[in-house]
Amino acid sequence: MPDMMAIVSKAVFEKDARGKGIGDTWATDRYSSQNKALANLAGGDLYLVTVRPPNEALWLVAVLRQPTFDTTQWSARANSLPIRDISSLKRTLRFANGQGLPDKVGALGMSLQTPRVLAADDLALLGGQLAGASADSSVDDDGAGDAPAKSSRAKSSSARPSAKSSSTKSSRAGDASLAGALAQLRDGHPEAALEALVDAWADEPHPVLAQLIASLSTETRTPAPATLRGKTAAARAAWDEHASDASAADIPMLLESLCDVSSGDAAERLPTVEGWMPDPRVDAAFVAVLKEVPYRATSTKPFWTRLFASLEQLRDPSQLERIEAIDFAGVAATMAEWLRMKQRKLLASLHQNLPTEHESRPIFDELALAIGGQRAAGAADRESIEHLFQSVYENPHDDGPRTVLADALIERNDPRGELITVQLRLAQDPTNRALKAREKELLDAHAKGWLAELAPIVMADARFERGFLSECKIDNSKLDRVQKLVGHPAWSTVRAIEGSALIALDPVMRSLEKLVFSQSNARHHEKLPDAWRDLLVETPRGIRELQYEHMHSERQWLDTVEGRRQVDVSDQSEIDALCACTALPELVRLGLRDNPVLYIGKLVRAPVLERLEQLSFIYERNNRFDAQRTSPLVDFRQLLELARVPTLRFEIGSFHETELVLERGAKGYERARMTLGPTMRSNWSHQLVDEAIRMLDTLPKLRELRVTTRKCTETQQVARLRAAATQMNLDACEVS
């Protein structure tokens, strides 16, 4: 049954304990919090503290004896102890975890956002502070020392302003915070100035003040460690750890990663973020989440219900226009209508409660000038770095700009500079184990952060080369996210991409050499019906390897040798363009993922074959292959006879796939490598070996064969395949 310490936010204290100061008694009987850390409290006492501007004084404002929890708050008998200034204990309190309060300016309030378990030594220190308070109370209670008692009451009375004067006092408190911020800026302490501005915002939520806070926050923000981003348990723990001890400068990085996790985990983070309010940056971040709609399934409504409740506390009137402009584009109709209903209710509440007029304040101009001086120094440095990045993007094939950028980043202790250096050295010495180990360490720690704005749509396993993104697969399930990032300069270093024609076909893709292009995805999901024409005919590109998937076709009723039936008929203009690839003069590898019947007739004599080094086919097994015991290569007989492409590759089936690679010799396709067999324990061995034997029968010019069977292939079926291969009288044959 440990005792614990928890913080009362500045806004809550000034609202619920209006006018109370040191020596006054705040007779509160509750603490509203659902923080899970308080689960340890059962049976212990709760010490409530608050941090007071402008010098971060730590006040003990109440002690709730053995409070009980009733789903939303902790309740106990009303506090009877007067408010005490315990700032002298800031350096001596250690708590049960051994981690004391931070010395960093601006971090005190944030460090107490997570309730702390008090150690025995802490309780002794607090007991010493409370002893004086108890003595004062006992003097008053027993009537002894009447004059001092009257003096104490008089002091308490004079410290408590009337309701009429409370707004004036709030304004004076705001003035003190603003003056303190200006002094801190002039003394070169921007972090402390930011803390004071946020305190001033609590007293006076002025739109200009919100802009000042945003500007200064840009200059003071803490760089986000890569361990903060992602859905892993380690990333979630890192977020919680930083949030429990966050300064005002840390808040932006935490807000940016708020929704990196599942909707359930994000909902659990919201109470912590609410504890940072009032803060215009939190207001802006909540509205940004509403605009982005990171969770779109109806099952995520609990998160949105919690977020809309948080938005009710918004105090920045400049956010109203942003909320009104949100249309929830890209969200399914049912969920979008539910969100719009919540949006209408929120706007009605905010319009009623937020002020519409704000008094101009001369000190705002002084603060803007002071912040401008801070920004000027930072802006010059950022502009220099941004210029170096831009130089890399404009010359992605040149190592010179990357080397210059690496030196500049290393001077600033930015690990990205080391990555560029390490990968440039690996390009010259790819077997260096020490460099490869360091490369892995850097990417494991920072790759997510280095993706920056691209991170929401770049899937796992993206590759970096020479310090920049080089290969990736795009998640285009949320099309509005993809559309926002079309043409982003960071795409210019990408050599290989899959998943989005919108991204891949933009002119910014200067380095693109390898593309997986789905005509079906481009046509139906990204609404680019003529993307194939841009790719194959109209816009020259340096693509060397193309995998073309899912050509456009329509089902039509046709008379066939098997009778009248529905047949997939391809777009002949698309097939003609694919057979020529006139816009891809450097193409040397072409892969086709579709039913061969759609294109094989024209591909046999296609002009593009004359310049290919490898031609690949990926397709599903056809039922007729089994029903008629026909080779899966039957549709390629003419191609095998006429084609001069050095290497043909076949991948048949999406599970238990069979892979066949043919290499051309003087008389045709004379060498073959085959991999087959079940990919898991199953009864497919017999059928797959039958299929392989029929494929070999389709290759009359074969002279050399190497077959690798997967470990789940039955032994007797391997022996049967070996016997069939031996009967072919090849020059070289190996079945393993």
Image: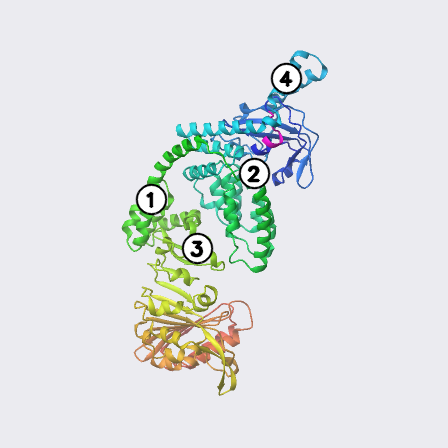
Horizontal arrangement in the rendering, residue 607 relative to residue 11 (left or right): left
Density class for disc 1 (Cα within 10 Å; few <14, some 14-19, many ≥20) is some
User: Sequence-wise, which precedes: disc 4 or disc 2?
Assistant: 4
Q: Position of residue 63 (x, y in %)?
A: 65, 28
Q: Answer yes or no: do the residues labelled 4 and 3 have beta carbons within 8 Å?
A: no
Judging by the rendered image, the residue that carries numbered circle 2 is 275
User: Sequence-wise, which precedes: disc 4 or disc 3?
Assistant: 4
Q: Answer yes or no: do the residues labelled 1 and 2 have beta carbons within 8 Å?
A: no
Density class for disc 3 (Cα within 10 Å; few <14, some 14-19, many ≥20) is few
C-alpha span from label 1 to label 2: 35 Å
The magenta-colored residue range is 14-20
Q: Position of residue 417 (x, y in %)?
A: 35, 45
Query: Callout 1: helix, strand or loop?
Result: helix
Query: Callout 4: helix, strand or loop?
Result: helix
Magenta segment: does it hold 401? Answer: no
Q: Nearer the viewer, mark 4 or mark 1?
A: 4
C-alpha span from label 1 to label 3: 24 Å
Based on the displayed image, in which of its 4 quarters is residue 605 positioned? bottom left
Give the number of callouts: 4
Judging by the rendered image, the residue that carries numbered circle 4 is 154
Q: Which mark is residue 385?
A: 1
- Colour scheme in use: rainbow
Q: Answer yes or no: do the residues labelled 4 and 1 have beta carbons within 8 Å?
A: no
> Which amino acid, mark 3?
Lys
Q: Quadrant of the N terminus?
A: top right
Query: Callout 2: helix, strand or loop?
Result: loop
User: Sequence-wise, which precedes: disc 1 or disc 3?
Assistant: 1
C-alpha span from label 4 to label 3: 63 Å
Q: Which mark is residue 484?
A: 3
Density class for disc 2 (Cα within 10 Å; few <14, some 14-19, many ≥20) is many
